[in-house]
Image (cartoon, grey):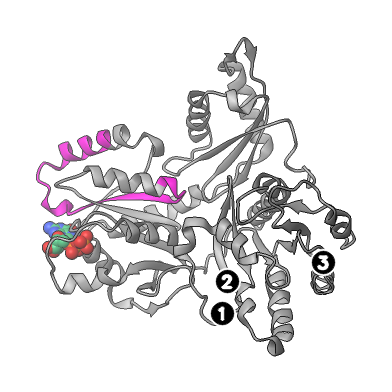
Amino acid sequence: MPATVAIVGRPNVGKSTLFNRLVGKRLALVDDTPGVTRDRREGDARLGDLEFTIVDTAGLEDADADSLSGRMRKQTEEAIRAATVVLFLIDARVGVTPLDAHFAEIARRSGRPVILVANKAEGRVGGEGAYEAFSLGFGDPVPLSAEHGEGLSDLYDALRPHVDEAAREDAAAGAEDPMRPLRIAVVGRPNVGKSTLINTLIGQDRMLTGPEAGITRDSIAVEWQWRGRPLKLFDTAGLRRKARVQEKLEKLSVADTLRAIRFAEVVVLCLDATQPFEKQDLQIADLVVREGRALVIGINKWDLVEDRAATWKSLREMCERLLPQIRGVPLVRLSGLTGDGTDELLKAVLEVEQTWSRRVSTSQINRWLEGVLERHPPPAVSGRRIRIRYATQAKSRPPHFIVFCSRPQSLPESYSRYLVNDLRERFELAGVPIRLTVRGGSENPFDPKG
Ligand code: GDP
């Protein structure tokens, strides 16, 4: 599980506004989780390079006064229970009210780490309320204006150690539960054969589930097993229906594609072997990389290919040349129509998931870094050398590395690319997106206060 951040506080302190700001454009993906009342919302949030799940209790703002306190308390407690860290909001303009103190008590008793946030603090520094806020016992408040987007970098600093820590614990939990279904999406241009392939893959075993949290109501998930491993496939409503009712040439829906990619851990990009690597194919591959998912490219309709050896050779060359950002991505020849190659496809899917989830120990990374610095030290910029001090893997799924150096802004993009390529080669991370963040200072991210 990634870090879960709960936004907690009495009504009207701005929880919803902060929720929306952190979830941003991804709001479209937020849906009511089945089985959970509308009192709590969940979304995928991003703040700088931090990614986490965010939960708020904003629905309660509308509850009538009578039922409010009990439900609100219950919802707050549940949100906190699921949280890695709690953002406790107060209204900086009002100061601490008895109701704030009441909720603070709930937060404190949970034993979860609490970050106190003084919201609606636009334009003010510190302010009279600061001492009062301090009395809640959560330390100094982070001044913020959720509405105007001020103070987000302080919020980032406060959240970062908790989010990083959750990622490390996640990794330390080791191999994922093998019975948890692996989430797969099949994407591609219209008519490359996605629906046909999906129908072949799931065969008779199909079991319809969903609607799922986080995906829209008109999409469903299909669950089945392959060699004992449960797999879950994202299926937009039209996809399988289309295989039965042949429609006119459809346009590619980028929104649907993006939704499918975000749902998935591993994305199968389906190409038509007779028209491979068209512009749209490359755009979709790029979306997958940007979203940080593992990728397998299925070369579909292989049954139509005549000169197979030559085609295969040229496909591999094209792939290396056109998708350098995901070097080594697995290519699988298949036919959704005949079923040839579908076992190889699923094998590649499971393998790339392993790569995508790989953890490299900090000592290995730093040994690698030493070698790199010797062979190819970072350039001097404005006459001064940039010193790289330390590196670590902050996250997997996809692998995300952090490099600490002096003057991070000056480190050339080309050098970061060099580091990524070298990491990919040295730690056998072929075919998965690699994230690299360059941070200033020499802080040790293993220090929880760091
Ligand atoms: P989608 O739009 O990507 O879902 O594509 P469809 O699955 O609807 O397939 C488009 C057309 O390609 C249909 O006429 C299919 O019969 C055909 N098709 C799909 N897969 C294959 C394949 O592996 N080989 C051949 N020869 N034709 C295929």
**Label 3, residues with CA under 10 Å away: few <14, some 14-19, many ≥20:** few
Range of the magenta residues? 289-318
Confirm or reject: label 2 Cβ below 8 Å from ligand 1: no
Look at label 1 and name its amino acid: Arg
Q: Earlier in the sequence, mark 3 or mark 1?
A: 1
Kindly identify the residue that appears in the image at 59 percent across and 15 percent down.
381
Q: Earlier in the sequence, mark 2 or mark 3?
A: 2
Q: Position of residue 186 (x, y in %)?
A: 32, 59
Q: Quadrant of ligand 1?
A: bottom left
Kindly identify the residue that appears in the image at 66 percent across and 44 percent down.
153
Examine the rendered structure and indicate whether residue 207 appears above or below residue 121. Answer: below
Residue highlighted by disc 3? 111
Q: Which mark is residue 174?
A: none
Q: Nearer the viewer, mark 3 or mark 1?
A: 1
Callouts 1 and 2 close, C-beta under 8 Å: yes
Q: CA distance from mark 1 to mark 2?
A: 7 Å
Q: Position of residue 312 (x, y in %)?
A: 21, 40
Mark 3 element type: loop
Asked where in the image residue 263 lies, by quadrant, the reply is bottom left
**Label 2, residues with CA under 10 Å away: few <14, some 14-19, many ≥20:** many
Q: Is residue 330 visible?
A: no
Look at label 2 and name its amino acid: Arg
